[in-house]
Amino acid sequence: MSREPDFAAWASPARRRAAADAVLIGSPPAVALAALGWRLGGLWPAFAALLAGVLVITFAARHRVSRLDREWLVRRLNAREASLEDSAALIFAKPELAPLERLQAERIAARIAALDPASLADDWSRRGIAATWLAGALALAATLFWPEPDPAPPPLTRAEPSTAAEGEPRLTGFRVRVVPPAYTRLPARYAQSLDVRAPQGSRIEWTLAFAPQARSAGVQLVGGQSIAFASSPDGWEGALRLDVPALYHVTAQGRQVTRAPHRLEPIADEPPQVQVIAPASGLVLITPGQRRWRVVFEASDDYAVDPLARLTLTTAVGEGENISFTERSRTVTGTGDAKRRRFVVDLDLAGFGLQPGSDLVAQLTIADTRSPARHVVRGPGVILRWPAPVPANADGLELMAKQTMPAYFRSQRQVIIDTEALIKRRGKLSVDDFLVASDTIGVDQRLLRLRYGQFVGMEAEETPRPPMPTSDKDEAAEPEHYDGDGHDHGEESDAPVFGGLGNVLAEYGHTHDESEAATLLDPGTRALLKSALDAMWEAELHLRSGEPEKALPFENRALDFIKKVQQASRIYLPRIGSTQPPIDMARRMTGKRAGIVAGGAALTPFVIEDAVPATAWRALAGPGTIDLGGLEAWVRGNSARMRDPLAVLAAIDGLRSAPAARTARDRLRSALWTVLTRPPAQVRRRHDGGATGRRYTKGLR
Amino acid sequence: MAPPGTIATLVIALGALGGAVRLLWWRHDWRAGVLATLMLTSGMLLYCAFFPPRLPVGGETLLVATAETPADTRAGAGERLIALPEAPRLADAERVPDLATALRRHPQARRIRIFGRGLPQRDRDTDVGLPVEFVPLPNPRGLVRLDPPADTPAGAGFALAGETAGLAGGTAELLDPAGRQVDSRTIGTDQRFTLGGAARAAGLAAFTLRLRDRSGRPVSDTPVPLRAYADAPIRVLLVGAPSPEVKFLRRWAEDAGIDLASRLDAGGGADLGSDTRVTLDPASLRKADVVIIDDRSLARLGSTGRAALAKAVAGGLGLVVRMTAPADAGTRASWRALGLGVEGGDEALPVALPPLAADAEALAAQRGPALADTANGLNTFDDPAPELGHWAVKTGPDVVDAVADAEGAMLAGWQQVGEGRIALWTLANSFALVLGGQSDRYYQWWSDTVSAVARPGSAFLPAVPALALAGERSTICRIAPGARIIDPDGKTVALAIDPAAGPAGCAAWWPTQAGVHRIIQPGRGRDQEFAVLILPDQALAALKAREIAEATSLWAAAQSAPAARGLPEQQGPRWPWFLGWLLASGALWFAERRWRLAPPA
C-alpha cells in the first residue's frame, strides 16, 4: 500500500468545486457588464467587457484553487474526521517518519482510504450564487430595458428668408415637434414645415428663433386665441393641443404679419371596421349533423383595435309568429396585429337549443383604443339558419301558408284558471268586489274574443288596433296573464265598466260582419274558430253579469275548440305585410267623401343652408363689401360637410388682410365654390326674343 | 393746231417712208430691201421712243406682315414690306397702324400679299380693291374651337365642346372654380371633345378647361364662363293620378323652387293634390307657365278640355304630356289635335344611361358637399344603374329632343305650337332613377324638359358674345337706353345704342380689362343687372388664330375675285425704244457705208 496517496486525486474535487463556484458567482456580473457595454458602446465594448470579466473570473478561480494545497488538505481531513486522530499530516506531509509515526500512519492510511475525496470539498456558496445571479439578472434587465433617453432635439430648421424692414424680427428658424396622443402609440416626430398635419389630439410644440431677437413671440390662431411663447435657450417655445382645424400666424413683437397663414390640420381618428372573414356569406344554412360553427371576424382600425370584443349571439327559435328570441353575449379576444385583429369564435351549437326553423345570429361589437371616448362599432351579423320544413304547396292562393298558430292562443286557458280561482274566492269577497273581479275576467275574455275574431274577419269593435300583430313585443303583453295579479288592467281605462248602459248593443251585439269574406283561414278552421268565438261570447256574457260558474262551461268549450284549431291544418298569412290605416267607423258606408284627404299635398320644403356662402360668392364678383365674420362663422359651423375647410378659412383670412386686392377676392370666391351646395336642377324660361321674337312666333303655324 | 404727237408722227412716218421708197426706187435687190426695212424699223422705234405705248403695268406689291410673320420675310424687287401692329419686329419693314394707312401711303401698290396669321377684324372691315394673296400658317397647337356652355339653370348640368389642334391622344379636363377636376376626356383622332359639369348657386362662375398633350403636360388653361340663373318661380299645374312618378316629380318641383299646384285624382272625386282644386279653365291656364299632364288625364279631359288646352298652348303655355301607357291610335289622334305630331309609341325600349361622371372623384366634385340628410353609404358610382324603359315614338323634324339617352333615343321632345310648346315625356317609370341614387339625373331631365317648354319670359337678358376677350370689340344687344357697364374696378362706361341696329337695341363695347363686368340697365323700380366675364386677351390665342386665318382667307378670296377691277395701264419706259432705234439707226448707217449703195448712174 502506498504510504503516499495521490494528493491531486484528493484535492481535485474540492478544487473543481471551488473553481465552478467562482465562475458561478462571477459570471452574472460579467454578463451584465458586457450588456452594459453593448448598450452604451456597441459590440466591441461588449466584447471587451466580456473578455475582462472572463479574465477576472479566471484569476479569481485560480486564486481560490491555489489556496487548496497540501496543508489545507491535512487541516480539512483532520477537521472532518475525528478518526484520523489529527494525524493526516503523517500521510500527506512528512516524507520521513519515525517508526511510531509510521505505525500511526499505516493505521490512518487505512482509514483515509475509506473516505470519499468529494466529501472534502467546500459546499456551494448558495447564497452568494443566488445573490449574484439575481443581481445580475436585475442589472441585465435594467441595462436592456432602461428607456432610451430622449434624443437631443434636432437643430432648428432654417426658415425661408423673407423680406423684413430694418430692425424687424425675422423668423430665422423653427422646430415643430408633434407628440401624438398616447393611445395612438405613434412616436413623437418633428414636422418639416410650419404647416402641420397630425393626429387629432396631438400636442404641437413650437420652437421659434428670430433675428434680431424679438421681445415676445407667439402664435396667433386665425379667428381664435393667441398663444404667447416662453423664452428658452433655443428660442421661443410654446405648445398647443390640436383638436380642430385652424390657421395660424407666427407673431413677434414688432413683426408685420404679411405671409399666408400656416395650417394646423388634425387627422381624425376613424372608427374601426369589422369584416366577416368566415363564413363567406351573411346567411349560412346549417348542414345536417353540424355540431360546431366557426365564425371569424376581422377588425381594423387606423391605430389599434381593442383586443377584447363583445360577441352578441341571438337565437330566434320558433316559427311564424311564435318566435322567441334569446340574446346572450360573451367577450372574445382578438389575435394579431393591433391595427388588424382577428376574432375567431367557435360556437358549440348544442347549447343554443336550435330547432328546424330557427336562426342563430352572431354579431361582433368592437372598440378602438381612442381616448377619451372610444369608437364602438357594431359589425355585420352572420346568420346560421336551420331551414324550416317546406310547407305543402298552396296552389292558386296568393298567400303563403304557415303551419303555425299565433302564440297568444293559449291564454284561453288562463281565463279558465282565473275563473276557477275567482269561484274559489267567492266567499272571501264582497258582492261588489266579486262583480268587479268577474267583470275584469270578462274584459279579458272579450279581448281574447276580439283577437280571435280578427282571424275570421271580424272587425275590432271599438278602439282601432292593428289588424295583425305587427311586432313581437306588442302582443306579448296583453293576452298572457301569468302573473295572476287580479287583472288590474290599467291601460284598459276606456273599457266599459259594469253597469254602464251606454253601448250595450255595441258591447254584446254580434256586430262583426261577413266573416266569410276573411281569407286568412281555410273553411274548416274558420268554422271551428267561429264556434270558439261563440262560446267565448257566451262566457263573456256570464262573466260580465257576475256568474262565473255559468261561464266556466263555455270557457272550456272555447278552449276545446281552440285546441282543435291548433291541431287544424294551417293558417294563411298575407305574403307581404301591409298595415292599413284604421277604418273610420263613423263614416263607413255613408258615401260621404268630403274631407277624406287630409293635407296630402303638403311637402316639407327643402332647405339648403348655404345662403351665407352663396350670397358672399355672388357679392365677391363685384366690388362690394363682404360680411367676412359671418362667412367665417358659417364655415366653422359647417366644416364637417366640407372637404377642406382650412382652404376657405385661409382665403377668408387672406381677404381680411388685404381687403382691396382683387386676387384675394378671386381666391376666396374660388374656394367658396367647394362649399356651395348644388341645388336640385332648377328651371329657367327661355327669352321671348322681344317684340320681334313674339311677332315671329305668332306668325308660326 | 394739231398736237405735237401728231406732227411728230407725220414727220417720222414721212421721213422713213420717203427714204425706203427712194431706195427701192433705185435698186431692186435684196440689199435695198434690208435697208428699207431697217429704215422703217428705225422710224417706228423713234416714234415709240417719243411716245412709248401704254402697258398694263403691275406697279408695287405690298407685303403685309401680320402676327407671327416669319422673321426672314424680305421685300424683293417691286415689293414693299409693311408691318401691322401685331407683327413681330422685322428688318426693313415699315410700321403702319393699319392696312388702310399703308394703302393711303402707297397708292402705287397694285397687289397685296399677306404673311403670318392674317388680318385682324379692324383691317377686314372694308374691301381694298386690290387682289390679295394669303396662305394661312398651320393651326397652332391648342384649343381651336370652343363651344362654351349655354346659360344654365342653377343646379343643372351643362356641357361644353371644343376642338384642338395637334393634341390627339391628349386629355381635356374641366376644372371647377376651385381647381378640382370635374370631368376629363381623352381627345380622339378627330381632335374633338365634350365635357360636362354642374352649376350650383345662381351667379357667374369661371371654370377652367385644361388641355394636356399625350405625355400629360399641360398645354393650355382656358377660362370658361358659366352663368347660372335663378329665374322667378315658374307656375306649374300638375294633373294626374297618384303614382310614385308624381310623388318624386312633386318632390323635385318643391325643391327646385317651382310654384306647383297639383290635381291628383284618386277616383271617386277624391283629389290628393293641392288644397284648392286645380282646374284647367282658360283663366288658370293663362296664369300657368307649364301644365304637366299624364296621358290618361289628357284623354279624360274630353275634346273641349283639350281644345282649351291647345288654345292656351298657342298663347304661350308650355304643356308636358307624360306617357304612362303605350300610345294607341286614339291617343295619337288626340295629341295631333293638340299640335303634337308623333307616331308609334306602342313599343317599350330600354334606356341606355350614360355614366354620371368619369369617376367617383369627379362625381363627388360635381355634386358638391352633401346635404345634411343625405345617406352616408350612398355609393352611386359603383351601384348598377336602374333599368328604365321608354316608349319609342317616331317624330318628324318639328320635334326637338329635350332629353336623349346615351344612344340618342329621344326620351322627351318638344314641338313649337304657336307661341307655346308641347313636350312629350316617354319614360314610364323615371322615378326609378331617384330610387337608384341618381336623383340628380332625374332632376336634370325634368329640368331640361320643363325649361324647354315653359312660357317664355321677358326678363333682362342682354345678348352678349359667349366668349368676349379683353381688347376686342364686342356687341351687346337687347339693351335699352341708359344701360351702362361697370368694370371690375368699379368704373362705369355708358353704352351708346346704335340707332342703325333698330329694335335689336345693340351697342358696341370695347372692354379693356379681363374680369367680371356688370351690365346695369335701369328698369322699373330697380336696376337690372347682368354679369359678363371678359377673358384675358391671350386666353383664346389658338382659337383666335384659327378664326383670323379663316376670316382672312375668306376676305382675301373676296378681294381677288376677277370682277374686282380691270388691270391698270401706264406709259412704258422710253429707253428700250430709244436703244432699239439707236441700234437700228447704227445698223442702217453701217450697211449704207458698206454697201455704198448709190443711185444708178
Image: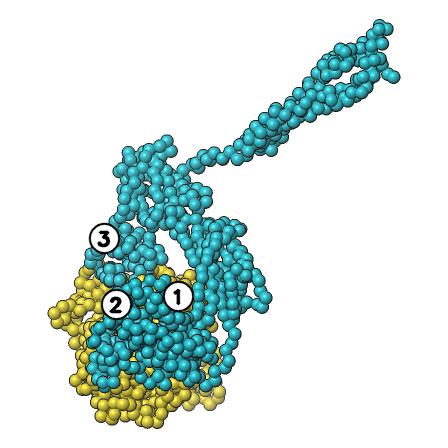
Tag 2 and tag 3 share a subunit: yes
Tags 3 and 1 in contact by the CB under 8 Å rule? no
Residue hosting label 1? B378
Is residue A268 visible in the rendered image? The answer is yes
Secondary-structure class at tag 3: helix
Residue at image position (68%, 19%) is A64
Secondary-structure class at tag 2: helix
- Judge from the rendering whether residue A536 lies leftward or rightward of residue A504; answer left or right: right
Return the x and y of residue A27 as percentages of the image width and height.
63, 27
Question: How far is mark 2 from mark 1, CA to CA?
Answer: 68 Å
Chain letter of the residue carrying label 3:
A
Residue at image position (22%, 62%) is B487
Residue hosting label 2? A431
Return the x and y of residue B64 as percentages of the image width and height.
34, 69
Residue at image position (28%, 51%) is A654
Q: Nearer the viewer, residue A269 or B411?
A: A269
B150 above or below A147? Answer: below
Question: How far is mark 3 from mark 1, CA to CA?
Answer: 34 Å
Residue hosting label 3? A629
- The N terminus of chain B: image quadrant: bottom left
User: Could you say which quadrant of the image residue B101 lies in?
Assistant: bottom left
Q: Nearer the viewer, residue A253 or A415?
A: A415
> What's the colour of chain B in the image?
yellow
Dot 3 crowding, Cα within 10 Å, few <14, some 14–19, many 20+: few
Query: What is the total number of numbered labels drawn onto the structure image?
Result: 3
> What's the colour of chain A in the image?
cyan
Residue at image position (21%, 79%) is A595
Tags 2 and 1 in contact by the CB under 8 Å rule? no
Chain letter of the residue carrying label 1:
B
